[in-house]
C-alpha cells in the first residue's frame, strides 16, 4: 500500500518535493474498525514550513480527508513557537467506542517548554482528543516526559527522550510509552499509565506554564530493561493482541528500524494485567 495525496499521486520524498508541497514523516497508524479506514499522523517537516498533520485514508492508501489540527501545531518559520522539527505527532490511540482519537506529541511545543535533558524533565507534551465525526478537537491534556535516563558513552554527544506511542486501556486510562536514546549506550524504554480525567483541559491555552494547568499524573507500569529482552531497539508502535484464554490482555510492541542496517524491526509481546 502507498499512502497518497489528494490528487492520487504518492507523497514525494524530501529530495523531490517542490517548496510548496509537504513531505510526510508518518509515525502512527491505527485501523478504524467501524469504517474500515486508516487513521495516521505525520510529524511534518518544520524546517520547510509544514507542521504535524492528521489524515484518514482508505485501505488502498487513497486519501479521504485531512483532519485539521489547532493553530498551535502550525509550523513557525521563525521557530519561536509551535512544534520542533522531528518532535511532532508521534502517538495515536482510539477510544474504545471508536468515536475519538487521541494524538500525542513527542515533545513540548516551543512555547510550552524545553525538550528533556539529562538533568531535567521536558516541558509538557500536548495530547489532543479529536472527535472523528466532526473532525474537531474536543479536549487536550498535558503530559510531562522524564529527563533523559541514560547518558551517552561519550559526554556531549546525542541523547534524547520523548513520547513514542500511546494506547487506550479503557475509556479514560491510557498507556504512554517513553523512548530514550543515547549515542553509544542505546535505547531505554519506560511504559506509564495515566488517567486522562486527572488533567486539566489545555486546549484553550496558547502557552503552558506551571501555574495555568495540571498535567496528567503518571504511574510506571514497566521499565523495559527489566523485562528480559536480549535487545532494546527503537520501540515506536503499541497495540493490543488477541484476547488470551485466561482473559488477560496481550500487549504487543514493535520497533522502527529507521532504515538503518544496524537496527532491527523487533516485535515483543507481554501479558498485561492492569
Image: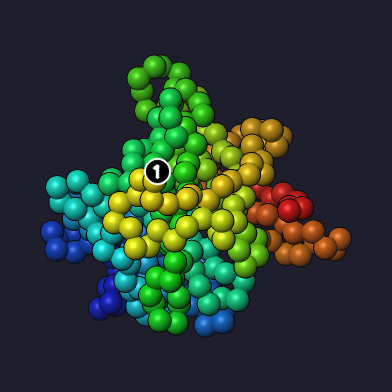
In percent of width and height, residue 262 lies at 47, 35
What residue is shown at x 39% (from left), y 77% (from top)? Answer: 135
| Closer-to-camera residue (63/99) | 99
The N terminus: image quadrant: bottom left
Res 160 visible: no
- Counting other residues with Cα less than 10 Å from the Cα at mark 1, is it few (<14), some (14-19), or many (20 or more)? few
Q: Quadrant of residue 54?
A: bottom left
- In percent of the image, x 43 and y 30: which residue is there? 120
**SS label for mark 1:** loop
The total number of labels drawn is 1
The structure residue drawn at horizontal position 36% and vertical position 59%, both measured from the top left corner, is 42
Q: Is residue 123 visible?
A: yes
Depth order, front residue of 52/131: 131
Tell me what residue is drawn at x 69 percent, y 61 percent: 241
Q: Residue furthest right?
A: 246
Q: Is residue 227 above or below residue 22?
A: above
Q: Where is residue 139 drawn, in percent x and y?
A: 44, 66
In screen coordinates, is 251 left or right of 207?
right
Residue 87 located left or right of residue 270: left
Q: Which residue is mark 1?
A: 210
Where in the figure is residue 153, as x and y percent of width and height? Answer: 45, 18
Image colouring: rainbow
- Quadrant of residue 196 in the image? bottom right
Residue farthest along the front direction in this orientation: 211
> In this picture, is 148 found above or below 176?
above
Taking 135 as reference, is 227 above or below it? above
- Residue 273 placement (x, y as % from top left): 77, 53
Asked if 235 appears above or below 27 in the picture, the reply is above
Amino acid at each position: 500500500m502507498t499512502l497518497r495525496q489528494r490528487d492520487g499521486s504518492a507523497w514525494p520524498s524530501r529530495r523531490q518535493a517542490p517548496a510548496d508541497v509537504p513531505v510526510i514523516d508518518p509515525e502512527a497508524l491505527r485501523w478504524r474498525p467501524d469504517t474500515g479506514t486508516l487513521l495516521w499522523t505525520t510529524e511534518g517537516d518544520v524546517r520547510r514550513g509544514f507542521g504535524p498533520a492528521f489524515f484518514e485514508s482508505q485501505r488502498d492508501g487513497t486519501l479521504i480527508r485531512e483532519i485539521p489540527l489547532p493553530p498551535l501545531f502550525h509550523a513557525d518559520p521563525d521557530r519561536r513557537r509551535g512544534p520542533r522539527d522531528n518532535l511532532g505527532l508521534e502517538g495515536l490511540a482510539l477510544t474504545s467506542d471508536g468515536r475519538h482519537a487521541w494524538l500525542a506529541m513527542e515533545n513540548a511545543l516551543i512555547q510550552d517548554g524545553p525538550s528533556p535533558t539529562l538533568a531535567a524533565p521536558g516541558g509538557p507534551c500536548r495530547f489532543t482528543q479529536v472527535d472523528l465525526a466532526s473532525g474537531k478537537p474536543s479536549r487536550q491534556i498535558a503530559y510531562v516526559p522524564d529527563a533523559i535516563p541514560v547518558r551517552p558513552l561519550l559526554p556531549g554527544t546525542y541523547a534524547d527522550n520523548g513520547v513514542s506511542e500511546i494506547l487506550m486501556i479503557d475509556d479514560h486510562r491510557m498507556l504512554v510509552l517513553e523512548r530514550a536514546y543515547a549515542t553509544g549506550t542505546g535505547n531505554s524504554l519506560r511504559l506509564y499509565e495515566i488517567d486522562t480525567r486527572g488533567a486539566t483541559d489545555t486546549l484553550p491555552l496558547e502557552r503552558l506554564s506551571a501555574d495555568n494547568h495540571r498535567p496528567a499524573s503518571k504511574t510506571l507500569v514497566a521499565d523495559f530493561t527489566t523485562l528480559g529482552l536480549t535487545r532494546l531497539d527503537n520501540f515506536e508502535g503499541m497495540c493490543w493482541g488477541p484476547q488470551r484464554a485466561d482473559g488477560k490482555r496481550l500487549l504487543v510492541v514493535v520497533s522502527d528500524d529507521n532504515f538503518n542496517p544496524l537496527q532491527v524491526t523487533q516485535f515483543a509481546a507481554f501479558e498485561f494485567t492492569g
